[in-house]
Image (tube, helix red, strand yellow):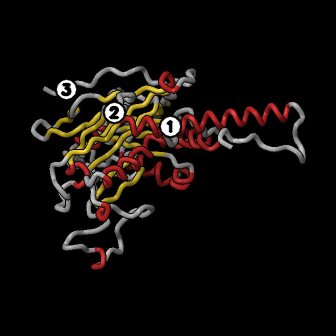
Amino acid sequence: MQPHPLPTPPSSSPPIAFVRQPCSRITSLDHFLSIAQTARTSRGRASVLFDSIQPAEVYDLLAAREAELERLHIRVFYNSRHSVVQFAEMPSTIHNVAVGWMAIMSKKMVKAGFVLERHLVSSGETSSEGSGDEDQLQGERKNFLITTADYELSDFDSGWNDAVISPDYVIIDSSCSTPSLCIEVGCSQTYARNTTHTGLLDRVDMLLRGTSGRIRAVIVVNIDEDRSKLEFHERFSGFLELWRYRSVVGDVYRDGNRVLLFDPNGGINVVQKDVYGDAEEAPAPGDRFLIRAKWLVANIQSHYRHHLLNRERKQEIKERMSEGDVGRNYEPPRRRND
């Protein structure tokens, strides 16, 4: 029996606009792009969604507004199985902080010997092109594991043949077109499968079922933020999950229990094949590594403290200016540790 996902708190993400009439799609996309241009904030993701849309129409929209989509860093999620395409603003700052947690994870994998440093692409590189004989070490490849954010993936089958998605973070062998491990992060957005097919689990279905398990695992990070709260442990909540593909029945399942965000000992267990895929260079195939939730919490907390400090300093500047304390003798407020 397949395990069922646990219920989650209601989403606080902005409502999704539906557009069904083909004649209004380009107009609606232009309207959305104008909003993204003039009102970019970190308070959620504005988005526009078109359903009952065919691949050719999607490609026409992408071609017509390619420059604007790239300039405004708009993400495209096209679920061809359900004929739905979503254009969304880039995620909030908290979302990006969560993705940064995966970079920390990569370093800890190296430190633990779970991943060999010589197998990882050097920082700042996006491929191992140009590697020659000098990059070979005792018959092994060097610099072939790429860790990157927003990798555009379109190599799907099983009904998702024309689909397009950019997972938040991937680990991929440079000789392959499909990642071995993907991370999907949701910040105050829908987790469960829904009628718009835009939930985090809808993306899990596409990544695992749409590749028939070529992607070995998907880590789901779901974070909810209550901006009315100031206390860190009250403001943030969430959980982590690990999802896999069961080829016998052609469906996905959650591997292990849900890990709560503030569980000090909790984490996601991955095996080396989740990182290396079918590559023979894995140092000890079968070894496990615990990706701890507390590393994510520390990253979010560091950002939150910095955010509060900046807000306090801006308020101090505002108060000084209102008192007339400006001019040649004005000094900006000192940092706490100055």
Residue count near mark 3 (Cα–Cα under 10 Å), binned few <14, some 14–19, many ≥20: few
Q: Which residue is mark 3?
A: 3
Residue 207 location (% of width, % of height): 28, 43
Please report the residue visible at 57 percent of the width from the left and 24 percent of the height from the top: 230
Q: Nearer the viewer, residue 19 or 260?
A: 260
Residue 236 location (% of width, % of height): 47, 27
Q: Nearer the viewer, residue 147 or 287?
A: 287
Please report the residue visible at 59 percent of the width from the left and 38 percent of the height from the top: 306
Q: Amino acid at mark 2?
A: Leu
Residue farthest bottom in this picture: 133
Q: Nearer the viewer, residue 7 or 72?
A: 7
Q: Secondary structure at mark 1?
A: helix
Q: Which residue is mark 2?
A: 240
> Separation of disc 3 and disc 1 at Cα?
29 Å
Residue count near mark 1 (Cα–Cα under 10 Å), binned few <14, some 14–19, many ≥20: many
Q: Is residue 315 above or below residue 159?
A: above
> Separation of disc 2 and disc 1 at Cα?
15 Å
Residue 308 location (% of width, % of height): 62, 33
Please report the residue visible at 80 percent of the width from the left and 31 percent of the height from the top: 319
Q: Report the quarter where the C terminus lies.
A: top right
Per the rendering, the mark at residue 56 is none
> Separation of disc 3 and disc 2 at Cα?
16 Å
Residue farthest front in this picture: 338
Indicate the quadrant where residue 131 lies: bottom left
In the picture, measured across the screen, residue 159 lies left or right of residue 236, that is left
Q: Secondary structure at mark 2?
A: strand
Camera-side mark, 3 or 2? 2
Mark count: 3
